[in-house]
Image: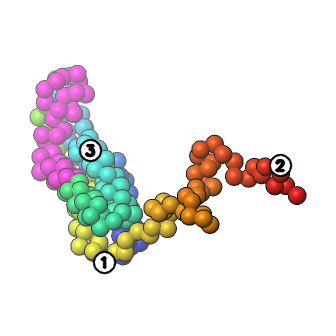
Amino acid sequence: MTRGRLAMLVTVLAVAVVATWGQDWLSGRVDDAVLGTATVSATGSQAAPGGVALALAVLAAVVAAMVTGARVRTAALVVGMLLALGAAALALRALASPEAILGPIAASAVGRADTLPVAAEVTPWAHAGTASAILLAVAALLALRGSRRWPDPSSRYDREQAASSGRRGEVVSSDWEDLSAGVDPTDVPAEDRT
């Protein structure tokens, strides 16, 4: 996979994670003496906290991999894949036990610290969010596989390692180094002006 296609794919999947995790994932009904019969819901960010942050960190890891050398690229993509797997695990946990997640949310609505029994159901947004997190992990794996063929970054903007030498072999500083040292390279002495 080329770097450009990977960047587009990971960006789209990260945006999908952010968009889907902002929707209601779980909804349920609770029968309580204080609440009565009430409907309780939880967004993806409440049901699987941290998933959005993990998806954005995957995006940052892929961007870092695109602008670094081979060793750092591999490390960044491994970290990105692990982060995406973490987001997918959080989403799968929310799908597996919606009552355990909605119970404390319902209890906090009435000021309790414990949990309330809730009859919960999973919305389609939860499945979409889980799928986007899993696809993000797959994209990171594909990037790791294909990154060996990516060219190394250009050294065009790297600082020169060898010092410049003048006409008689003396070390000459660049105009940029002169500016950093407080010397104006455009300031011409009076005797040289003609």
Q: Is residue 112 above or below residue 136?
A: above
Image position, residue 183 (x, y; %): 66, 45
Query: Which secondary structure dominates the residues rendered in magenta?
Result: helix
Task: Look at the image and tell me whether residue 3 can be seen.
Answer: yes
Residue under pointer 2: 190
Q: Secondary structure at mark 2?
A: helix
Residue under pointer 1: 149
Pick the residue in front: 40 or 115: 115
User: By what rule are the colours in the image chosen?
Assistant: rainbow
Point out which mark residue 50 bears: 3
Three-letter amino acid code of the residue under disc 3: Gly
Quadrant for the C terminus, please.
bottom right
Q: Residue at x 27, y 64 (%)?
A: 71
Q: Secondary structure at mark 3?
A: loop
Quadrant for the N terminus, please.
bottom left
Which residue is situated farthest in the right direction here?
194
Pick the residue in front: 136 or 82: 82
Pick the residue in front: 71 or 143: 71
Q: Which residues are magenta?
A: 86-115
Total labels drawn: 3
